[in-house]
Amino acid sequence: MGHGRYIAPPEARYVVGAGESLELTFSVMPGESKDIDISVDLAGEGASFDLKGFYILGGEEKVNIRVLVHHKAPGCRCSQTVNGVAGGSSQVRFDGRIIVAPGADGTDAAQTNRNVLISDSARVETTPQLEIYADDVKCSHGATVGKLNEEELFYMRSRGIPDREAKVLQLVSFLSPAVSGEDGIAAVEDALRRIMV
Amino acid sequence: MQDILLNIKGLHASAGEKEILKGVDLEIRRGEVHAIMGPNGAGKSTLSAVLSGKPDYAVTAGSVTFAGEDLLAMSPEQRSWAGLFLSFQYPVEIPGVTISAFMKAALAARRKAAGLGELSASEFITLMKEKMAFVGMDPSFSKRPVNVGFSGGEKKRAEIFQMAMLDPVLSILDETDSGLDVDALKVVADGVNAMRSPDKATIIITHYRKLLEYVRPDRVHVLKAGRIVCSGGEELADVIENEGFDKF
């Protein structure tokens, strides 16, 4: 496997060898219910994995995301950024797991899953987990479930930006670290407008 | 065109259970600059928040008309479209949204409300450059997220820049002068003075007389315990500076 970016199929198993890198992206758009199961073995020294994924839900979608990254060799790195907006009565479950095997020294792993709930009946359950069996590793993980920032919204509205557009602007900026490319951002804006009606 | 731009009558407002404004009366004519001074907790910021439509406050009595329209019935964005601008005491940071994108969205919405088409990209950039130069902001700021990592002075400068971009009919400056050095104070003053015109008006909310040396007000009011307790000409600012608010 060489360098390149792939769109993850719902179920994906990858083995990344020494010096190789893998980039994956996924997206879940309004109306889609998906089970996404990604498993990556960083099997050779210096292997690298980047994941960007986002979801934008505004109805009755059910989304399950599992990401397992297994650091099996020394000096491997991974970075995972998964952000989502949940509205309507959508349900999201995110299980992120990073395992650092014995001997995988010098591991550099980061995982974040951030969520904004835009309705009272949407549900997000997020469980990031780290299992570390090696020394000299740098690992971080973080998960948040929050709401729209009212202060920012009022500031924007006071400048004449309509409520709905202000929310879209704020959520685009929230999702953008998990979105790749200009095309991606345009699609995100469009999807947010659809669920913000 | 109606001579009275803003007419506040018997305005009562609360934050939660607490009544803060207890019957404010104020009339502002086009062409005038009014200063509202008062001690901490007098209700100055509540007044500006209520006028701009901040959701955290409830108006319990009274009325406000703006250019003859019922201001209190309008949403915050409608108030902006009607020509009201509030310079925030604490400008809000918006990570991920550049000043350029922010102003583009604001201008587009306002022009749409006025039945005008969007500015072309080059017209917009020209306007931004002109207004940034006017307040002495480096053009590189246009690509920075709104207020993120700005110094106190840069934030206030950015507020005046936004004011110049939106060209409001009524500008309310909520303690825009607090914490500013003389250079930044002059930027604010130049901004306000340049916007002075026979059909516009400005409200300056402040603790200090300093800004009023650069922007000379037509009227000065003392707001205390939720009411305007004294009004006068600019000499009133001198009295306050020398004797404080206790005498009112």
Image (cartoon, grey):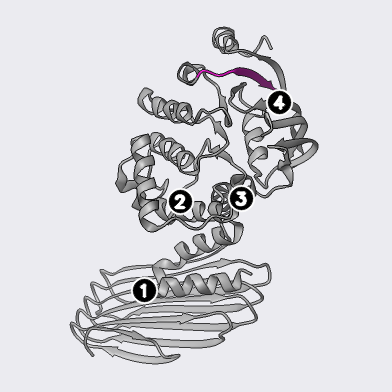
Three-letter code, disc 1: Ser
Tell me the magenta residue range: B216-225
**Residue B21 in picture, x, y percent from top left:** 73, 31
The quadrant of the image that shows the N terminus of chain B is top right
Residue B219 percent across, percent down from the top left: 61, 18
Q: Report the residue marked by disc 3.
A: B77
Q: Are marks 3 and 4 on the same chain?
A: yes
Name the residue rendered at 65%, 12% in the picture. B246
The amino acid type of the residue labelled 3 equals: Glu
Q: Which mark is drawn over residue B26?
A: 4
Residue B30 occupies quadrant = top right
Q: CA–CA distance between discs 1 and 2? A: 24 Å
Disc 4 versus disc 1: nearer the observer: 4
Distance from label 4 to label 2 (Cα)? 31 Å
Residue A145 is at least partly visible in this image: yes
Q: Secondary structure at mark 1?
A: loop
